[in-house]
Amino acid sequence: MKLLSIEWLKIKRYRTFWVLAGLFLLLLPLWNYEVASGFIKLGGKGGVNFLSTAYSFPQVWGNMGFWGSIFIMFISILVIILTTNEYTFRTNRQNVIDGWDRMQFFHAKVMLVVLLSVAATVYLFILGMVFGSGYSGSFSGLFSEIQQVGYFFILSLNYLGFGLFLAIWIRKSGLAIGLFLLYSLIIENIVKGTINHYSDMPVGNLMPLQASDELLPFPLMQMAKSILGGESTISMTTYALVATGWCAVYYFGARAILLRNDW
């Protein structure tokens, strides 16, 4: 708690923190409201709002989780900026002068990642309750598929942990953010597609960020699979365990880098 309170002192007056956190808090419900209202329709304007049923219980959990997995990018970038700022402004050295060791500095960032992941998950749960009760007309089916809220926590921890790893490894905010976006949006998708093309099983889906993305697929794809009877050869439990394992890789990898490099 002491480490977290010191982290809070660093960020509570930092405008970038409030801007990026505010974008996540504001855009997630606004986007879902637009989608639920028919922003995305099959056949264009006047077509069928095929995602309207995705906001009833229990479909709301997977639907909110998918859109949340996109907007969590704001929080991931925030983690990168907050961490690289420590090196830019030499506050990491000041922490050591004030009595911290390297592991206290590192674990303060790790706890911040966990706390932000918990906060994002709680927020998503509250939004799911609001949208689900509104479009269902009751709380029937509230706890069905509730595990998808847990999947979103794993996904958040995965993305934020990856961002922390890059920040400690590269130490430059612009370069770390650029690599994060390049890898998450382009590189991983290319490598995943190539591996899956030459494999009998979709083992490319087990790559760092993709493993958690598979926990919360796009609702339309999920609906198509249920209609066509197509099932993934890799279970959700496997994806959850692999994504959690990648979080451990980020932790020990960043820890080793921090202990090996000059302070």
Image (cartoon, rainbow, N blue to C red):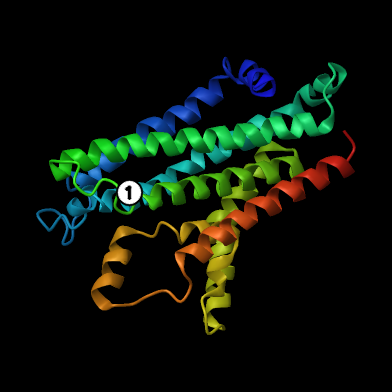
User: Viewer-proximal residue, 75 or 128?
Assistant: 128
Question: For the residue marked with disc 1, what is the amino acid?
Answer: Trp
- At which x and y percent is residue 247? 63, 51
Residue 88: percent from the left, percent from the top?
75, 28
Residue under the image location 16 percent in, 54 percent down:
49
Quadrant occupied by the C terminus:
top right
Assign the N terminus to one quadrant of the image: top right
Q: Residues within 10 Å of mark 1 (few under 14, many from 20)?
A: many
Q: Secondary structure at mark 1?
A: helix
In the image, residue 87 above or below residue 192 = above
> Is residue 50 found left or right of 257 in the rendered image?
left
Task: Report the residue at 46% width, 69% height from top.
Answer: 235
Residue 22: percent from the left, percent from the top? 43, 27
The reply to whether residue 175 is visible in this rendering is no
User: On the picture, is 90 further left or further right than 162?
Assistant: right
Percent of width and height locating residue 158: 57, 49
All told, the count of numbered labels is 1
Instruction: Check the image and report above or below for 49 versus 80.
Output: below
Q: Quadrant of residue 85?
A: top right
Q: Quadrant of residue 30?
A: top left
Residue drawn 45% across and 48% down? 150
Instruction: Look at mark 1 in the image and give the residue it sits on.
Output: 61
Above or below, comparing residue 223 to residue 148 in the picture: below
Q: Residue at x 72, y 38 (%)?
A: 172
- Asked if residue 196 shows in the view, the reply is yes
Horizontal arrangement in the rendering, residue 133 relative to residue 151 (left or right): left
